[in-house]
Every structure is written in structure tokens, then in C-alpha cells.
Image: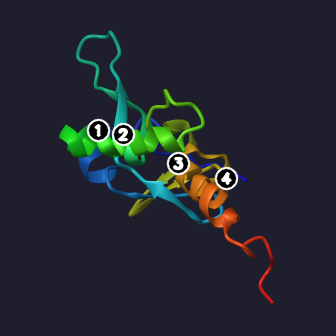
Amino acid sequence: MTVDHSHAGREVWAVLELLDRQLIDRDGRLVGKVDDVEFAIDDEPDALPRVTALLSGLGALANHVGGDTGAALAAAERRLAARRDRQPSRVDIATVTDIASAITLDADREDLDTNRGERWVRDVVIDKIPGAGHAAE
């Protein structure tokens, strides 16, 4: 598969071009939504901030909501994480192959951290339902 990095190094308006966009894996499956953006700022004078990652999930959303509701969202995110000190789901900007009405990633949904909520529901809730492990007839 050839990855198009023509967008590498381009300037983007993060609020307009990244936030609230759907994330799509290499097979066209939805994997989440961009709830926040991580930046790095170089030490060079007049350097613009660089997007280093897209953040998704309850942990990222909790930072925007704040207060008791934000704390509850953050607690729910920690319960979904394998490690309790987990930060918001992070998608490295290097996996982005296209920025359009949705953001396409060069990654598989199962390998992305944004899928941990779905995995938790599958493993903790769905798999406990009698007959859930049987194929449909």
C-alpha cells in the first residue's frame, strides 16, 4: 500500500480541519472521533505549533467538559483502560494518510487505542451474555 504524505508539513486550522472529524482505519471502518489535538512547539523563533497526535475518547472529552461531569468522564475512561494511569486515546499524526471530511489512518482498528472502549464492552459485557459467542444461524 502506498501512503500519500502530501499533507505532511502543511498548515492546518486544527479547529476547522481536525476537531470532531471521524477517524477511519485503512479498511474504511470507523474508529472514533477527534476530541482534542496534541501539539508540540519547537524552540525556533516564530515556529508554529506542530500537531503530534489526535486525541479521542472520554479522556480527551473530559478535559473540555471539566467540573464533576468531566471528572466522571475521566473516571469512566480510566476504567476502560488496561492501565489506570492511562491518558486519552492517542493516534500519532504519522498514521494520518488523508485529511478530508473524515481523517483516514494507515492503521487497523484493532491496533488503535481508540478502540479500547469497544473492546471493553465486548469483553466485559457482550461476551458474558449467554449465546453471545455462537455464530448466527
Given contact means CB atoms under 8 Å apart, are the residues at marks 2 and 1 in contact? yes
Q: Where does the image place residue 23, in percent across and percent down from the top left? A: 48, 56
Given contact means CB atoms under 8 Å apart, are the residues at marks 3 and 1 in contact? no
For residue 99, which quarter of the picture? bottom left
Q: Report the residue at 63% width, 60% height from top.
A: 122
- Circle 4 sits in a helix, a strand or a loop, which is it? helix
**Looking at the figure, which quarter contains the C terminus?**
bottom right
Q: Is residue 53 above or below residue 49?
A: below
Closer to us: 29 or 116:
116
Left-right relation of 48 to 135? left
Q: Earlier in the sequence, mark 3 or mark 2?
A: 2
* Mark nearer the viewer, 2 or 4: 2
Residue beneath disc 3: 114
Name which residue type carries label 4: Glu
Residue beneath disc 1: 71
Q: Earlier in the sequence, mark 2 or mark 4?
A: 2
| Alpha-carbon span between mark 3 and mark 4 | 9 Å
Closer to us: 39 or 135:
135
Q: Where does the image place residue 114, in percent across and percent down from the top left? A: 53, 48
- Circle 2 sits in a helix, a strand or a loop, which is it? helix
Residue beneath disc 4: 110
Crowding near the residue tagged with mark 2, few <14, some 14–19, many ≥20 C-alpha atoms within 10 Å: many
Name which residue type carries label 2: Ala
| Alpha-carbon span between mark 3 and mark 2 | 15 Å
| Alpha-carbon span between mark 4 and mark 1 | 27 Å
Crowding near the residue tagged with mark 3, few <14, some 14–19, many ≥20 C-alpha atoms within 10 Å: many
- Circle 3 sits in a helix, a strand or a loop, which is it? helix
